[in-house]
Image (tube, rainbow, N blue to C red):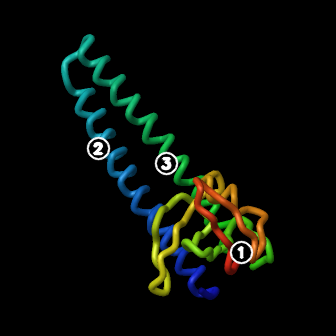
Amino acid sequence: MEDLTRIELIQDCREYLNKRIAVVQKAMNGLKEDLENESKSSAGDKYETGREMINIEWNKLTVQMNEYERLSQILKRIEDHKPTDKVVLGSVVMTNAANYFISIPAGEIKAANQKCYAVGVKAPISQQLLGKEEGDQFTINGKDFRILDII
């Protein structure tokens, strides 16, 4: 994998985020409509209950949107990543078992026809990889890993 692939990985992660953001935004727009319709309906306890349920759902969606914004900021930081000898945020790490992109938790993505797992820094595999160098070995869940390359 080369630098172009890392750029592709960032683009794939950004697409992943944009899809999630679009889903949340659509749900929020639906809630706005529901709230407007709720305001037009009858007054009383039913009105207050409906309104409160909409507010609870709105708060959940706001938390999700804030998380996606945080992940988007991480991707922006990664865009300026310069390759190092050690695994850091933004590294593409090739091991004997799989390839990992230390970035955001976007799951399996493909670049240059190779599978790569986009994982956040809090993921167990990331915790094992961070700070390691090419040739280092580690074990997770009884499986041995060896770092073949870091980009």
Q: Is residue 59 above or below residue 44?
A: below
- Residue 61 is drawn in which quadrant? top left
Task: Tell me, yes or no, if residue 151 can be seen here.
Answer: no
The quadrant the C terminus occupies is bottom right
User: What residue appears at the point 68 percent right and 74 percent down from the top-left corner?
Assistant: 147
Give the label, 2 or 3, closer to the camera. Answer: 3
Q: Amino acid at mark 3?
A: Met
Image position of 8 (left or right of 47): right
- Residue 132 is drawn in which quadrant? bottom right
Q: In the rendering, at what x and y percent does residue 9 appear?
A: 54, 75
Residue placed farthest to the left in the image? Answer: 42
**Residue at which label 2 appears:** 30
Q: Which of the numbered marks, if any, corresponds to residue 80?
A: 1
Total count of labels: 3
Image position of 140 (left or right of 60): right
Q: In the rendering, at what x and y percent does residue 103 appear?
A: 61, 64
Task: Tell me, yes or no, if residue 127 can be seen here.
Answer: yes
Q: Amino acid at mark 2?
A: Gly
Taking depth in this image into account, of 62 and 4 the one nearest to the observer is 4
Q: Residues within 10 Å of mark 1 (few under 14, many from 20)?
A: few
The quadrant the N terminus occupies is bottom right
User: What residue appears at the point 71 percent right and 74 percent down from the top-left corner?
Assistant: 80
Q: Helix, strand or loop at disc 1?
A: loop
User: What residue appears at the point 78 percent right and 72 percent down from the top-left corner?
Assistant: 133
Q: Amino acid at mark 1?
A: Asp
Q: Which of the numbered marks, if any, corresponds to residue 65?
A: 3
